[in-house]
Image: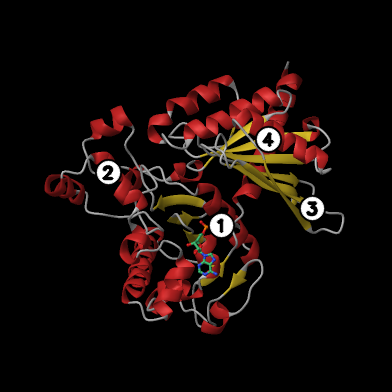
């Protein structure tokens, strides 16, 4: 029972093929620089010994259609998938589902039209995601396809948390509200936390911190998201690699007035030149950590600001949740940067969060708990796996569809 997960960007397609009987990865890879001179395929396939063997091929890949065909043929040649007919389904990552998609959706012409209508909310991502779905549907028409939305997990956020305090008309006519992103990751790690703690997710209050190059926090009450730090776009909230996160909106008008920069130029500064990069010149947390260790004051400031912003969100979400059972760290930084985890939890004993320094620094594999014996709140490091979550949601959506059609047939 195999499921292929596709994540289509404007010039790339990332893929993972799962055997859903044991959720193992059979093959994975990416096609990069589609339509450019350096286009190439990087493919890893599981060998009979269980290791992943890697191949890289540089070849001309002119468009996504050719890219998908190449993925199908490399999966066939390496023995991972004899034919697309072997697939139970294809799951597609879709960045923006607006208010329409609260759950994954079986891809139909109507669903494609609805995703297209959301392009103004995600002009960089939704067109590329749509292209991936269209190409896969054309190339493998018999395989059911499912769209899994980054925003869907946050659709349970109540109105008092998703509205901005701006004229209501702007929400009604332009859909301006908090949507939130990284929902697939927040949902996955919340489920894993419940498994790890051996408690029903519905009984837990959690704060999930997805700290990667992009970063967001989510407040999860009894399994449902009630607030998240990203907003209409992924620019709001925590400090990120190159994004500023929360900002006084008047800064934008002040900048325009004082410098004459256009709104596009300011948007680019806030998205691509800010965050860690804006503060200390580099956006990679490993390098920021090394620079701070070597005594660079700007890198130290970047770390202090990064952790302080997260602490403010922990405090706010602790209040919103009315108590906390677990704090989850995930993403490249959350999973690997012990100095960031330490900085985020420092001084939070009054909220019941006390870290064990040794456990925080120690080696880890899979989920691990790093709180001290005195801590009232569990502090967890949980590796995220957005592709597996998409594969699981694809299966769940297709199985729900199947049981609905069986029920319809029985009722006829
Ligand atoms: P992601 O977007 O989830 O792949 O995360 C990327 C971020 O994780 C980058 O800022 C990396 O520098 C950071 N990262 C990955 N490994 C480490 C590590 N061992 N220590 C500190 N930061 C890390």
**Residue 361 sits in quarter:** bottom right
Q: CA distance from mark 3 to mark 4?
A: 19 Å
Query: Who comes first in sequence, dot 2 or dot 3?
Result: 3
The residue that mark 2 highlights is: 265
Q: Quadrant of the N terminus?
A: top right
The answer to whether 410 appears left or right of 11 in the picture is right
Looking at the image, is 371 positioned above or below residue 302?
Answer: below
The residue that mark 3 highlights is: 46
Q: Residue at x 28, y 40 (%)?
A: 264
What secondary structure is marked by label 4?
Answer: strand
Q: Residue at x 82, y 40 (%)?
A: 77
Q: CA distance from mark 1 to mark 3?
A: 28 Å
The residue that mark 1 highlights is: 190
Q: Position of residue 261 (x, y in %)?
A: 20, 44
Near mark 4 (Cα within 10 A), the count class, few <14, some 14-19 or many ≥20, is many
Query: Who comes first in sequence, dot 1 or dot 2?
Result: 1
């Amino acid at each position: 029972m195999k499921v292929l997960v596709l994540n289509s960007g404007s010039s790339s397609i990332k893929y993972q093929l799962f055997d859903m009987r044991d959720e193992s990865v059979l093959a994975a890879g990416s096609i990069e620089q589609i339509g450019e001179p350096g286009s190439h395929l990087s493919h890893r396939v599981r060998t009979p010994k269980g290791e992943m063997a890697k191949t890289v091929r540089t070849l001309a890949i002119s468009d996504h259609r050719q890219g998908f065909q190449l993925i199908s043929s490399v999966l066939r040649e390496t023995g991972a998938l004899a034919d697309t007919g072997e697939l139970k389904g294809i799951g597609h990552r879709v960045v923006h589902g607006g208010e329409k998609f609260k759950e994954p959706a079986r891809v139909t012409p109507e669903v494609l039209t609805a995703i297209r209508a959301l392009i103004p909310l995600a002009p960089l991502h939704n067109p590329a995601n749509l292209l991936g779905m269209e190409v896969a549907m054309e190339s493998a028409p018999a395989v059911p396809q499912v769209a899994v939305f980054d925003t869907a997990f946050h659709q349970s956020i109540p109105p008092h948390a998703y509205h901005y305090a701006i004229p209501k008309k702007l929400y009604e006519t332009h859909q301006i509200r908090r949507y939130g992103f990284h929902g697939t990751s927040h949902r996955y790690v919340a489920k894993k936390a419940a498994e790890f703690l051996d408690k029903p997710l519905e009984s837990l209050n959690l704060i999930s911190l997805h700290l990667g190059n992009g970063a967001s926090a989510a407040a999860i009450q009894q399994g449902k998201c009630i607030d998240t730090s990203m907003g209409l776009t992924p620019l709001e909230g925590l400090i990120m690699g190159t994004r500023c996160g929360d900002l006084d909106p008047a800064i934008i008008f002040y900048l325009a007035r004082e410098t004459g920069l256009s709104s596009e130029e300011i948007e680019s500064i806030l998205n691509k030149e800010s965050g860690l990069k804006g503060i200390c010149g580099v956006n990679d947390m490993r390098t920021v950590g090394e620079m701070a260790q070597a005594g660079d004051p700007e890198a130290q400031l970047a770390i202090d600001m990064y952790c302080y912003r997260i602490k403010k969100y922990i405090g706010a979400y602790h209040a919103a949740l009315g108590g906390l059972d677990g704090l989850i760290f995930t993403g490249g930084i959350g999973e690997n940067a012990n100095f960031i985890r330490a900085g985020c939890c420092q001084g939070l004993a009054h909220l019941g969060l006390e870290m064990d320094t040794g456990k925080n620094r120690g080696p880890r594999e899979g989920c691990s708990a790093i709180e001290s014996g005195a801590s009232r709140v569990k502090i967890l490091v949980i590796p995220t796996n957005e592709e597996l979550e998409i594969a699981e949601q694809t299966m769940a959506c297709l199985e729900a569809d199947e049981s609905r059609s069986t029920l319809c047939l029985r009722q006829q």
